[in-house]
Amino acid sequence: VIEEEKLQENCAVVGDYFLKQLASIDSPLIGDVRGKGLMIGVEFIDENGKPLPVDRVGNIFEGVK
């Protein structure tokens, strides 16, 4: 199934697109975006460039649901 439906290739294509879209977001809260395939990480930072506490990151995710 993985080979027949080309799931790995699709993951790479969709992941590259998603990564580029995330990296293009101009926000003072985003410090870095990195990943491979659909395994992507976004670093959220405060106004001093330090990582946001987990509870504040959780609030961001709750706000975009």
Image (spheres, rainbow, N blue to C red):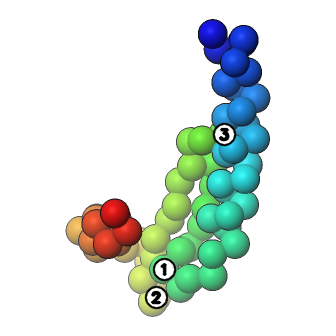
SS under mark 1 = loop
Residue drawn at x 53%, y 85% is 28
Residue 45 in the image, given as x and y percentages of width and height: 46, 76
Ranked by sequence position, the earlier of labels 2 and 1 is: 1
Amino acid residing under circle 1: Leu
SS under mark 3 = loop
Residue 12 in the image, given as x and y percentages of width and height: 73, 37
Residue 29 in the image, given as x and y percentages of width and height: 48, 80
Q: Which mark is residue 48?
A: 2
Q: Which mark is residue 29?
A: 1
As drawn, 56 above or below 26: above
Residue drawn at x 62%, y 64% is 22
Ranked by sequence position, the earlier of labels 3 and 1 is: 1
What is the distance, in whole Å, between disc 3 and disc 1 at their CAs? 23 Å
Amino acid residing under circle 2: Asn
The answer to which of 49 and 14 lies nearer the viewer is 14
Q: Which mark is residue 18?
A: none
SS under mark 2 = loop
Foreground label between 3 and 2:
3
As drawn, 14 above or below 26: above
Q: Which mark is residue 37?
A: 3
Q: Total number of numbered labels?
A: 3
Look at the image and tell me whether residue 53 can be seen: no
Residue drawn at x 67%, y 45% is 15
Is the residue under label 2 in contact with that under label 3 (CB below 8 Å)?
no
Left or right of residue 44, residue 38 in this image: right
Residue drawn at x 67%, y 35% is 11
Foreground label between 3 and 1:
3
Label 3 Cα crowd, 10 Å radius (few <14 / some 14-19 / many 20+): some
Ranked by sequence position, the earlier of labels 3 and 2 is: 3
What is the distance, in whole Å, between disc 3 and disc 2 at their CAs? 30 Å
The answer to which of 28 and 25 lies nearer the viewer is 25
